[in-house]
Amino acid sequence: MATKYYTHFVTHTGRPAGRVRRPASGSEWSGVVELRQPLNNARANRELRALIAQSFDLDSDEIRILHWARLH
């Protein structure tokens, strides 16, 4: 059974966009993440960052979790 979490996070990328060099950009996001297994509380931030980074095609160090909570 899937476990759902509300997440609020910021993406930050230092990659230049296109050929023109631009300052690092980022965005703030929130939403529900559905996982097949519950998060391990000791590693929850790391696990969420890895999952979100994979979905956004970013490195996990480019994700900063602001808040997360399990939905019941």
Image: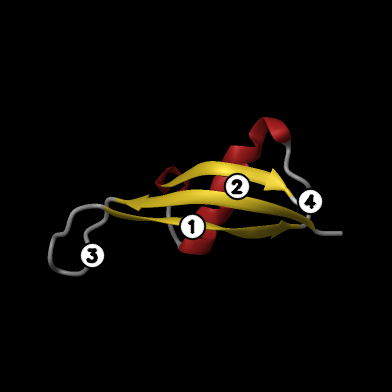
Q: Residue furthest left?
A: 20
Measure how far apart labels 2 and 1 are at the Cα level.
13 Å
**Among numbered discs 2 and 4, the one appearing first in the sequence:** 4
Q: Residues within 10 Å of mark 4 (few under 14, many from 20)?
A: few
Q: Which mark is residue 29?
A: 1
| Colour scheme of the rendered structure | secondary structure
User: CB of mark 2 within 8 Å of CB of mark 1?
Assistant: no
Which image quadrant: the N terminus?
bottom right
**Amino acid beneath label 4:** Gln
Measure how far apart labels 1 and 4 are at the Cα level.
22 Å
Q: Is residue 54 left or right of residue 21?
A: right
Measure how far apart labels 3 and 4 are at the Cα level.
35 Å
Residue at position x 73%, y 43% from top?
39
**Among numbered discs 2 and 1, the one appearing first in the sequence:** 1
Q: Residue furthest top?
A: 42
Q: Which mark is residue 48?
A: 2
User: Which residue position is annotated with label 3?
Assistant: 17
Q: Nearer the viewer, residue 19 or 30?
A: 30
User: Which residue position is annotated with label 4?
Assistant: 37
Q: Is residue 63 left or right of residue 72?
A: left
Horizontal and vertical percent for residue 28?
A: 43, 54
**Among numbered discs 3 and 4, the one appearing first in the sequence:** 3
**Amino acid beneath label 3:** Ala
Circle 2: element type: helix
Q: Residues within 10 Å of mark 2 (few under 14, many from 20)?
A: many
Measure how far apart labels 2 and 3 are at the Cα level.
25 Å
Circle 1: element type: strand
**Amino acid beneath label 1:** Trp
Q: Residues within 10 Å of mark 1 (few under 14, many from 20)?
A: few
**Among numbered discs 1 and 3, the one appearing first in the sequence:** 3
